[in-house]
Amino acid sequence: MTISTKGNNSEKAMPDYITPSWVRPWWRPWMGYILAMIGFLWATAGFFNFYFKLGLPELIFNRFSEIFVIAIYGVPVIIISREKYQRFRLTLMVSLLVTFWYIIPVYFPFNVNLFGLYRTDFPSLDMPGSLTNILLLILGLLFGRRVKCGWMNTCVAIKETAGAPFRRFTAREPKFFNRSKIKIITSIPFLICFILIFTPAGEYKSIYLYWFWTVVIVIYFGALFLSPIFGPRVWCRWMCPLLFGWVNVLGFFRLRVDKNKCTECGACEKRCDMGVPIVLMSKKNPSIKTTECIGCGRCRDECKNDAIRFYDVRDFIKEKLLKKDRDR
């Protein structure tokens, strides 16, 4: 799948991608949008067919349809990505998802349940109480939300592969960023799931869990089809109840802006799919803590002055060791 605009202005419209010369003469934006919607429909129909038993051919429409979409759409997007780091990140993301979300569950399945809330098969990264969920939260506290959202997340991957044509429509104004606070409310039902871990088994627990995940699935896939209006990250920015963004605030992760190098040009903000107002936030504190950054690195790639870098537990340890050496 190649993303461009009409004629020779494709790179100006979508600077993240390079349109191959043999594609440029005949490619039109609407082709990318149609392909994106086909990918979204395939992933949605597959999971709904698995979850709600719609009677569609299970060979094509199954719980792994989203992974198939990510893999099929991911290869061309990786090829046309302009930055080397993004090609590496997307290659790793697609490879990890295919391995951990398809190959292992299908051919080498094993259980990762810890607290007995319900049966959880590997990887179960979003299931509260599973061993993998707890380990992932620990890693998130050390290295930030990027360990999941930036590197091994189906939610992000389908938006950066099949949904790539819609990235240009991302709503990046500060008013849209401020709406991310609604996730404080949407996180409450997920917190209840954690509480239910420590309650006796019963019908009320089963009913709650069924309806919670049913609503999450419906809203998650439904949000994909709002991509032409707000960009592909509607779910990630305003609806995701899974609390993982809070590891950015509670842990070591920071987005650090060197004010001596930053010219406040705003180029970084134009590349951020999460709509983080980096320049505005860095004026208040050059060490930015936000639930929204997924550590994709696009802002860092875009900065011509090398003014942006990530900070995590490794930097914290280095600073402590340097301080210890200076104090000797």
Image: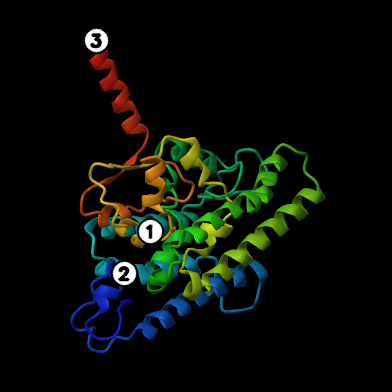
Q: Quadrant of the C terminus?
A: top left
Circles 2 and 1, Cβ within 8 Å, touching? The answer is no
How many marks can you see? 3
- Most foreground residue, 182 or 243: 182
Q: Quadrant of the N terminus?
A: bottom left
According to the image, label 2 marks what residue?
Answer: 77
Residue in view at x 51 percent, y 52 percent: 109
Gap in Å between the C-alphas at discs 1 and 3?
A: 42 Å
Name the amino acid, label 1: Cys
Task: Name which of mark 1 and mark 3 comes first in the sequence.
Answer: 1
The percent position of residue 106, horizontal first and vertical second, equals 49, 59
- Judging from the image, what secondary structure is the residue with disc 2 in? helix
- Judging from the image, what secondary structure is the residue with disc 3 in? loop
Asked whether residue 106 appears in the rendered view, the answer is no
The percent position of residue 77, horizontal first and vertical second, equals 31, 69
The percent position of residue 9, horizontal first and vertical second, equals 24, 80
Name the amino acid, label 3: Arg
Task: Name which of mark 2 and mark 1 comes first in the sequence.
Answer: 2
- Judging from the image, what secondary structure is the residue with disc 1 in? loop
As drawn, 23 above or below 67 = below
Per the rendering, the mark at residue 227 is: none
Gap in Å between the C-alphas at discs 2 and 1?
A: 18 Å
According to the image, label 3 marks what residue?
Answer: 328
Asked whether residue 115 appears in the rendered view, the answer is yes
Residue in view at x 39 percent, y 65 percent: 160
Gap in Å between the C-alphas at discs 2 and 3?
A: 52 Å
Q: Which colour scheme appears in the figure?
A: rainbow
Mark 2 surroundings: few (<14), some (14-19) or many (≥20) residues within 10 A: many
Mark 3 surroundings: few (<14), some (14-19) or many (≥20) residues within 10 A: few
As drawn, 6 above or below 160 = below
Q: Is 12 situated left or right of 269 in this image?
A: left
According to the image, label 1 marks what residue?
Answer: 272
